[in-house]
């Protein structure tokens, strides 16, 4: 991200009058590592964001409920060519409060909440069992938009979870049949054998049961819509659920 396009940082510059033996030592004994670190920093500082025209966000036209706006933004991201706009980050925490995050697919968004699925025995499943709260993050770079969602999570029953899985592709079923998600894997060859057997099972039995597969629904308590702006005048519209319904407020960027 480059806020100042003409700016170039020189991390190894030595102030006037200072000794340079530390830099000399780095050049003599660690030239490769130092050069790689400098190149990486320069890469980060040279990357540009939002060099395209971004859509406007008229907050006065935003609906009272965040769900219609979320559906609209996801549809517009897809129409803008964003690859896999239904991917999202899911943040959970374990019993001690240590967070973890991963990327997965959104399965639905309706009046109940935002839907996703996994095995109960996976890391996310275990964490949600002890702390049934989570946060979601969506980012659509082509339109400079983010959506953040936070709330409580409930697990759907076996029938609804099975229906969710069997609405998906044969590949999704095969992956679910492999199971053992988040367990230690002995080798990639072991995975290949298990995956091949699971694909055969999925083709032979498209309705094969996977008892550990669980559909989760996040009931939103907060939803934030972020529209980026090339001049850094970002627009943030925050929805907060209260006893009598949703409240909207703007946030400083």
Image: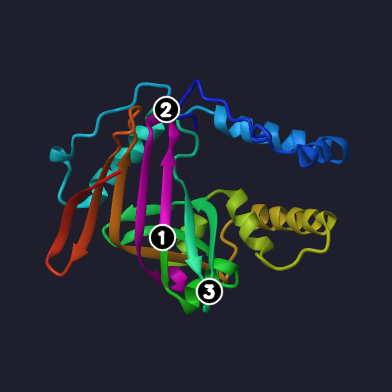
Look at mark 2 in the image and give the residue it sits on: 50
Q: Which mark is residue 187?
A: none
Look at mark 1 in the image and give the residue it sits on: 135
Left or right of 242 on screen, residue 153 = right
Look at mark 3 in the image and give the residue it sits on: 94
Residue 156 seen from this side:
no
**Residues at marks 3 and 2, CA–CA distance in whole angstroms:** 36 Å
- Give the quarter of the image for residue 42: top right
**Residues at marks 2 and 1, CA–CA distance in whole angstroms:** 25 Å
Work out whether residue 85 or residue 251 is closer to the camera in this orientation and state it: 251
Left or right of 39 on screen, residue 129 = left
Q: In the figure, 122 relative to 20: above or below?
A: below
Indicate which label's residue lies in the foreground, 3 or 2.
2
Q: Residue furthest front?
A: 17
x, y percent for residue 210:
59, 67
x, y percent for residue 147:
35, 47
Indicate which label's residue lies in the foreground, 2 or 1.
2
Q: Earlier in the sequence, mark 3 or mark 2?
A: 2
Q: Earlier in the sequence, mark 2 or mark 1?
A: 2
Residue 208 seen from this side:
yes
Left or right of 44 on screen, residue 141 = left
Q: Earlier in the sequence, mark 3 or mark 1?
A: 3
Region in magenta: 135-159
Work out whether residue 64 or residue 206 is closer to the camera in this orientation and state it: 64
Task: Residue 143: say if magenta.
Answer: yes
Q: In the figure, 170 relative to 3: above or below?
A: below
x, y percent for residue 28:
87, 36
Work out whether residue 98 or residue 90 is closer to the camera in this orientation and state it: 98
Give the main secondary structure, helix, strand or loop, of the magenta stretch.
Answer: strand
Residue visible at 41% across and 60% down?
135
Q: Residues within 10 Å of mark 3 (few under 14, many from 20)?
A: some
Task: Residue 100: say if magenta.
Answer: no
């Amino acid at each position: 991200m480059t806020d100042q396009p003409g700016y170039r940082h020189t991390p190894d510059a030595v102030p006037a009058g200072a000794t340079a033996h530390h830099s000399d030592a780095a050049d003599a004994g660690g030239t490769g590592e130092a050069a790689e670190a400098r190149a990486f920093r320069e890469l980060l500082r040279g990357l540009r964001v939002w060099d395209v025209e971004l859509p406007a966000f008229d907050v006065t036209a935003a609906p009272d409920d965040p769900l219609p706006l979320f559906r609209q933004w996801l549809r517009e991201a897809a129409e803008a060519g964003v690859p896999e706009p239904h991917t999202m980050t899911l943040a959970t925490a374990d019993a001690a409060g240590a967070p973890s995050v991963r990327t997965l697919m959104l399965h639905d968004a309706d009046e109940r909440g935002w839907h996703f699925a996994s095995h109960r025995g996976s890391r996310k499943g275990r964490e949600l069992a002890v702390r049934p709260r989570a946060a979601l993050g969506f980012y659509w770079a082509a339109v400079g938009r983010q959506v953040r969602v936070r709330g409580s999570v409930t697990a759907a029953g076996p029938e609804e979870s099975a229906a969710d899985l069997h609405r998906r592709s044969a590949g999704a079923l095969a992956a679910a049949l492999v199971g053992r998600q988040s367990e230690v894997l002995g080798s990639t060859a072991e995975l290949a054998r298990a995956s091949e057997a699971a694909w055969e099972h999925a083709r032979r039995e498209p309705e094969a049961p996977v008892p550990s597969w669980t559909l989760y629904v996040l009931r939103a308590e907060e939803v934030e819509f972020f529209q980026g702006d090339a001049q850094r005048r970002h627009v943030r519209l925050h929805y907060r659920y209260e006893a009598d319904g949703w409240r909207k407020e703007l946030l400083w960027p």
